[in-house]
Amino acid sequence: MNAIEQVVTETPAPQVANGDLSITQLIIDASPLVQGVMLFLLILSVVSWTVIIQRGRYLKYCSRMAVQFENEFWGNIDLNQLYQNCKSKTSLSAMEKIFTAGFTEFARMHRQGVKNKDTLMDGTYRAMKVSCSREIEALENHLPTLATIGSISPYIGLFGTVWGIMSAFVALSAVKNATLAMVAPPIAEALIATAMGLFAAIPAVLFYNRYATKVEKLENQYLNFIDEFSTILNRNTASSANNQQ
C-alpha cells in the first residue's frame, strides 16, 4: 500500500447527505471558536428579527394614529373639546401628546396674563417641539441595534471563516498528500460562518433603511402639524386682540 492509499484509508469519510456535505454535521465538526462565532451570529439574528417585528408594529401603529388624529383635528371640532377629549384618555398617541403639550402651554401662559403674541407663540411652539423630540426618540428606539447588527455581522462571520480556513490549512500542513475529501469539509465549515453573518446582516440593513424612512416621514408629519397648529393659534390670538380693541 503506497502513501496515498494509506492516507485515504486512514482518513474518515465526510458526512454526506444526498450527495452533499451535511450542514448540521459540518457545524458539529467545526472548531470551538467557529462554533462560538456561529452561535453569536445566531443570537444576533434572533435579536434582529425581534427588533424588526416590534418596530414594524409600533411604526404602523404610530402612522395609523397620526392619520386618525389629523382627521379629528381638521374635522371642524372645537379645539377646547379636542383638548378635553385628549385629557380624558389614559394613553395618548404621539400627535395627541404634541397637541396637548402645545395647548397646555398656550392656556397656561394665557392664565399668567402674557399678552405679547410673539412670546405666547414662542412658548407654545417650544413646548410642542420638546414633545415632538421625545416622540422621535421613541420612534428611533432600537433602530441603532439594527444598524449595528447589519454592520458587524459580516465581519464576525468573515472572522470565523478566516479562522476556520487557517486552522484547516495548519492541520493539512502535517499531511504529505492531501485529498479533496480532506480539504473540502473544513473549508465548508468555515464558510458557513460567513453565510450566517450575511443571513443576520441583510435583513437588519434592509429593515433599518425601511424604518428610518418611515421615522423621517412621521417626523415631517409631526413638524407639519406643529406649524399648522401654531398658525391656527396665532390667527386666533390675533383675532382676539383685534376684538378687544
Image: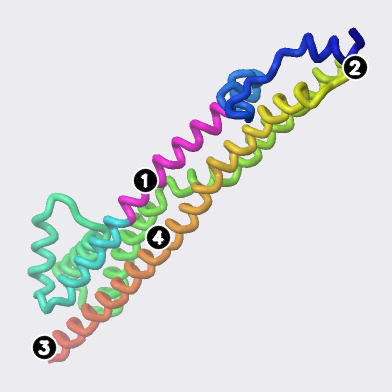
Residue 244 falls left or right of residue 128: left
Q: Which residue carries the number 4 mark?
A: 215
Label 2, label 1: how far apart the Cα atoms are:
53 Å
Q: Which residue carries the number 2 mark?
A: 176
Label 2, label 4: how far apart the Cα atoms are:
60 Å
Q: Which residue carries the number 1 mark?
A: 53
Residue 234 falls left or right of residue 183: left
Q: Mark 4: few, some, or many residues within 10 Å (few <14, many ≥20)?
A: many
Badge 2 amino acid: Lys
Helix, strand or loop at label 2? It is loop
Q: Which image quadrant for residue 191?
A: top right
Q: Nearer the viewer, mark 3 or mark 4?
A: 4
Q: Where are the magenta residues, as a range?
A: 38-59
State yes or no: discs 3 and 4 in contact (Cβ < 8 Å).
no
Q: Which image quadrant for residue 23?
A: top right
Badge 1 amino acid: Ile
**Percent x, y for residue 96?**
21, 62
